[in-house]
Image: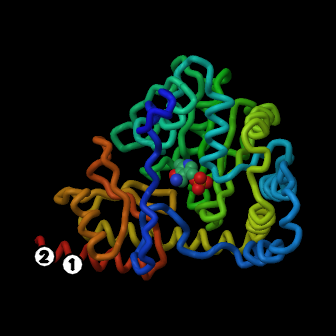
Amino acid sequence: MSKFWSPFVKNLVPYVPGEQPKLSRLVKLNTNENPYGPSPKAIAAMQAELNDSLRLYPDPNGERLKQAIADYYGVQSRQVFVGNGSDEVLAHIFHGLFQHGRPLLFPDVTYSFYPVYCGLYGIPFEVVALDEQFRIRVEDYQRPNGGIIFPNPNAPTGCLLPLEAIERLLKANPDSVVVVDEAYVDFGGATAITLVDRYPNLLVAQTLSKSRSLAGMRVGLAVGHPELIEALERIKNSFNSYPLDRMAIVGAAAAFEDRAYFEQTCRQVIASREQLVGELQRLGFEVLPSAANFVFARHPGRDAEGLAAGLREQGVIVRHFKQERIRQFLRITIGTPEQNQALIDVLEHFHFIQT
Ligand code: PMP
């Protein structure tokens, strides 16, 4: 800490990202990346953009990408916002839509960036406990609030809230912005974007980091009523008027246009997930029902932190969270069938030597 820091910075509690190891031989199942590469068409589009045009600024509105997203979801491009990863999109949402003096509501077990943004933007918040099965109960969100946000499927649990429950939440909170963070929705959920034309208080955030395998490129988006989008554009233009570079715009647009590749890789991840769940259950794990590209699992006889450390020693990294309610769980990203098998092999070995 330096004397030059403002008191504001001294008091910030920043987010701690998952480990990005330098050793490539590790089986990396800790930060929910896609085990398959991005669409070859997206890569080709980015390669084609690598030319003299890079001396020119990109389109500040990223219109080419907004139109591709609008076409994909059957909405208008003025209902679409794009930014540098959904983390940046979420930052603008917190900054522009949640500062009402009343507490923002989100689940007690959820994406750990939410309280960090509240700290950054001075937003009061209250956490709402998940039920015994780690599910969101929308009835618990019917109290005065300055907004509601949750991931669907939730992170790090993977549990899915049906659209019908989201509609009940929207109807019960007509004066609050409800943000559904759909980082993982393509692995088994139904998007709430189909509801945006009926609910002006609904904003849906998504990322290209997971189902479209472009985590390294940093592209996220939000879809909602044009007035909500306008608030985000105002924040963006007061912060970084060019959030996306030329390659990100064309690469992300091509990824949305390559539906076949997207659907095929999502199907592969879902099939691997179902297989991994079966294997983990065979080894005595309890696995929460997952609609994401990860599973959240605990073993009644094992300390999860020790298990994560033991796995790491054997070259497999998974994620462990120290938060009290979930400290017995491991969050395991779905890898290729070979990577999943490597995880099971190590777990089986532990099982064998300890039982
Ligand atoms: N929302 C949730 C629920 C997430 O788990 C993540 C990934 N850590 C993000 C948003 C951010 O994704 P990105 O910034 O890569 O788009």
Report the front residue among 310 and 71: 310
Amino acid type indicated by mark 2: Ile
Query: Which quadrant of the figure has residue 275?
Result: bottom left
Which quarter of the image is occupied by the C terminus?
A: bottom left
The 10 Å Cα crowd at callout 1, few under 14, some 14 to 19, many 20 or more, is few
Report the front residue among 287 and 314: 314
Measuring from the top left, give residue 193's x and y in whole percent: 71, 46
Dot 2: element: helix
Can residue 117 be spotted in the picture? yes
The residue under the point 56% across, 18% down is: 102
Which quarter of the image is occupied by the N terminus?
A: top left
Query: Which quadrant of the figure has residue 307?
Result: bottom left
Q: Which mark is residue 128?
A: none
Measuring from the top left, give residue 22's x and y in whole percent: 44, 72
Amino acid type indicated by mark 1: His
Mark 2, residue position: 353
Q: Which mark is residue 349?
A: 1
Measuring from the top left, give residue 21's x and y in whole percent: 43, 68
Measuring from the top left, give residue 199's x and y in whole percent: 73, 33
Residue 222 horizontal side relative to residue 302, left or right? right
Residue 268 horizontal side relative to residue 340, left or right? right
The residues bearing labels 1 and 2 have C-alpha atoms spaced at a distance of: 6 Å
Dot 1: element: helix
The 10 Å Cα crowd at callout 2, few under 14, some 14 to 19, many 20 or more, is few
Q: Is the Cβ of the residue at disc 1 closer than 8 Å to that at disc 2?
A: yes
Residue 26, relative to residue 232: is it above or below? below
